[in-house]
Amino acid sequence: MYTIDKLKEFGADTAEGLARCMNNEEFYLRMVDMGIADERFDSLADVLASKDYDKAFEIAHALKGVLGNLSLTPIFDPMSEMTELLRARTDMDYTELVNKVVDERNRLLSLK
């Protein structure tokens, strides 16, 4: 189970995330659990590999919003960078950014 201390250790801005959740710790932790389990994380790499940048942008933008609202900074930062590149329809190898997102998500999942 996630705790505020574990999320702080991870690098989340828990004060900001809690504030967005009306300082309701139970609600915030439930939202983190739901947000990090979002199935769109699993499809992002495949969509990028197919170079469907419109679909990839939709996925990345939605996940960026979730991560930003929960203040999960270590995952939010690379997702934000990816979102802006996709917004510009940049044709590039996204492997490094996807790997950062996956690695940070896995690190957070291991704290559960």
Image (tube, helix red, strand yellow):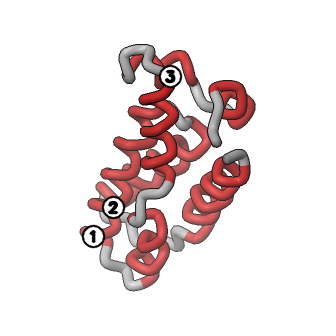
Task: Identify residue for label 3.
Answer: 25
Q: Kindly identify the amino acid type of the residue bearing the numbered disc 1.
A: Lys
Cβ–Cβ below 8 Å for labels 2 and 1? yes
Task: Identify residue for label 1.
Answer: 55
Foreground mark, 2 or 3, reads 3
The kind of secondary structure element at disc 3 is helix
Residue 104, position as x, y percentages in the image: 65, 52
Which comes before the other along the chain, label 1 or label 3?
Answer: 3
Residue 36 vs residue 89, the one in the foreground: 36
Residue 48, position as x, y percentages in the image: 42, 75
The kind of secondary structure element at disc 2 is helix
Foreground mark, 1 or 3, reads 3
Measure the C-alpha gap from mark 2 to mark 3.
27 Å
Measure the C-alpha gap from mark 2 to mark 1.
6 Å
Residue 25, position as x, y percentages in the image: 50, 22
Residue 101 vs residue 14, the one in the foreground: 14
